[in-house]
């Protein structure tokens, strides 16, 4: 008789991974504490040990997870801004099921640290008004991804689309990013 493997301990990381899997595969509306507990093979109440505020805390953690971007960019402020914008787009497109949370929840915790890091990197590279530029970049990335997800048909409950990316999405994103960076340059944001 084979030895029984001990259960994998419940952790916040496992909870986030399972919740993202449910949200991306079935939609955010189908993400319940009970369904999440079933996916993790635990009682739903066990999740509250890691998220005492329950589902609201879960939504906050998911929003934080998909809006926390880490980039060690070098070069000009434009190169750094491009690296941050591309990384943000990739993360959001990887988890379209929680895009609405990214759009509506204020940044907290590691997401705020990420925004601060981005602002500091752009300022160090010579971008005046880096905080305003970061807000503009985040707004562009979020809006661009929302349009791409919409155009892909991913959110249509009757669609069989598995990928939120579109064939022309990256090209359109890059064209818009070029325009935004040119606008920042033209309005005197570059030192």
Image: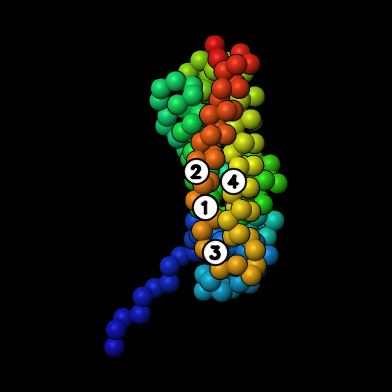
Find disc 4 in the rendering and name its residue: 145
Q: Distance between the residues labelled 3 and 4?
A: 16 Å
N-term mark: 4 or 2: 4
Horizontally, residue 165 falls left or right of residue 55, namely left
N-term mark: 3 or 2: 3
Residue furthest bottom as drawn: 1
Frontmost residue, 119 versus 75: 75
Find disc 1 in the rendering and name its residue: 165
Horizontally, residue 134 falls left or right of residue 78, namely right
Label 1–label 2 contact, CB within 8 A = yes
Find numbered disc 1 in the image and state the secondary structure of the residue it sits on: loop
Find disc 2 in the rendering and name its residue: 170
Residue at left 52%, top 69%? 40
Q: How far apart are marks 1 and 2 (CA)?
A: 8 Å
Disc number for residue 14: none
Find numbered disc 4 in the image and state the secondary structure of the residue it sits on: helix
Q: Distance between the residues labelled 1 and 3?
A: 10 Å
Label 1 Cα crowd, 10 Å radius (few <14 / some 14-19 / many 20+)? many
Residue at left 67%, top 52%? 100
Q: How far apart are marks 1 and 4 (CA)?
A: 9 Å
The mark total stands at 4
Residue 78 lies, in percent from the top left, at 49, 24
Disc number for residue 161: 3
Q: In this view, does 149 lie above or below 74?
A: below
Residue 105 lies, in percent from the top left, at 69, 46
Residue at left 51%, top 15%? 126
Residue at left 49%, top 56%? 13
Residue furthest front as drawn: 168
């Amino acid at each position: 008789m084979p030895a029984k493997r001990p259960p994998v301990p419940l952790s916040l990381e496992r909870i986030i991974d399972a919740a993202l899997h449910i949200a991306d595969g079935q939609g955010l509306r189908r993400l319940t504490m009970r369904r999440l507990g079933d996916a993790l093979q635990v009682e739903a109440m066990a999740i509250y040990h890691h998220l005492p505020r329950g589902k609201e805390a879960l939504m906050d953690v998911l929003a934080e997870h998909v809006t926390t971007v880490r980039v060690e960019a070098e070069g000009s402020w434009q190169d750094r801004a491009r690296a941050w914008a591309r990384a943000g787009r990739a993360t959001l497109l990887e988890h379209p099921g929680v895009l609405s949370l990214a759009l509506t929840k204020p940044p907290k915790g590691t997401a705020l640290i990420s925004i601060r890091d981005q602002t500091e990197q752009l300022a160090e590279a010579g971008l005046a008004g880096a905080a305003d530029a970061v807000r503009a970049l985040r707004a562009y990335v979020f809006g661009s991804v929302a349009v791409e997800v919409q155009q892909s048909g991913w959110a249509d409950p009757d669609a069989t689309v598995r990928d939120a990316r579109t064939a022309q999405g990256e090209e359109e994103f890059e064209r818009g990013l070029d325009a935004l960076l040119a606008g920042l340059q033209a309005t005197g944001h570059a030192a």
